[in-house]
Image (tube, grey):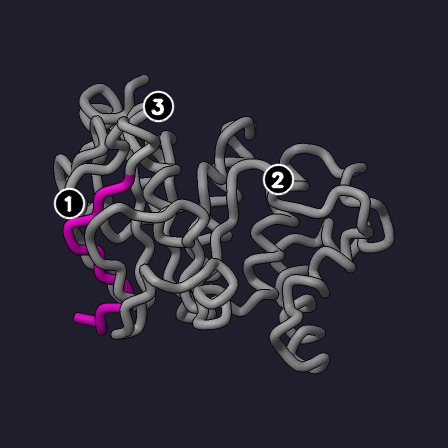
Amino acid sequence: MSETILKIAGLITQYGQLTALKNISFEVFENEIIGIVGPNGSGKTTLLETIAGTLKNRKGEITFLSRRIDDLTVRERRKRGLMLVPQENNIFPMMPVRKNLEVSGVLNSHEEVDRLIDYASALFPVLKDQQTQGAHTLSGGEQKMLAIGIGIVSDARLLLIDEPSIGLAPKLVTKLFNTLKQIKEETGKTLFLAEQNVKILRIADRVIGLEGGEVKFVEKSSSLDEKSFQELYMGQ
């Protein structure tokens, strides 16, 4: 088994008096795709934001690459190789497409940024074809591609991606998921995806089910049936 890249232990996050995450614990291994699944309100986005540091946990430990990070800022976590691609506000809409990508590689050399932009553009050709256009002119699906391209150019070891399939047509969901799997296989990155689309089972190594802010199960995707899984866990 691969080395542990992320370990969550006894994580509790609150909004005022509301406890959104309740004693969450699990591990994520290097070069793994993890799907965080559950109905709306189950705590998926809160979990990603807490790991990324945009929300502060009340209790518990977050360990990334063998170092506790729950006391670090978002920027410090980003410098260590952890990046969140949020569901919304995930691009700079008035900047050209290429500038969006360049800005995300600010911690890397110019040569490395160019290499990563070339790689992201090979995965998502629209990023090259429309590189001089304002990001706001892209379609919703193209903006999702740009947001993930930003994550790639950041060269983060662990990408936290919130609801990448939401609002996409079924064929585009399949294509996007296949590309995410390709990224994992070609780069060795670890992907941590919050999802409500049952197709996540086709690319994830394991899935973690949340309900009411609690972990209800951790399973290998290969052991789960899509139809039964959707009826029982996806709230659809």
Label 3 CA crowd tier, 10 Å (few <14, some 14–19, many 20+): some
In screen coordinates, is 109 left or right of 151? right
**What mark, if any, has residue 219 been given in the picture?**
1
Q: Are marks 1 and 2 in contact (CB under 8 Å)?
A: no
Q: Residue at x 17, y 35 (%)?
A: 214
- Of residue 25 and residue 223, the one placed in the foreground of this image is 25
Count numbered badges in the picture.
3
- Of residue 208 and residue 185, the one placed in the foreground of this image is 208
Q: Which dot, 1 or 2, sits closer to the camera? A: 2
Where does residue 86 sit, x and y in percent of width and height? 51, 43
**What mark, if any, has residue 89 been given in the picture?**
2
User: Would you place residue 220 above or below residue 216 in this image?
Assistant: below
Q: Residue at x 63, y 61 (%)?
A: 120
Q: Quadrant of residue 215?
A: top left
In screen coordinates, is 113 left or right of 213? right
- Of residue 46 and residue 224, the one placed in the foreground of this image is 46
Q: Which dot, 3 or 1, sits closer to the camera? A: 3
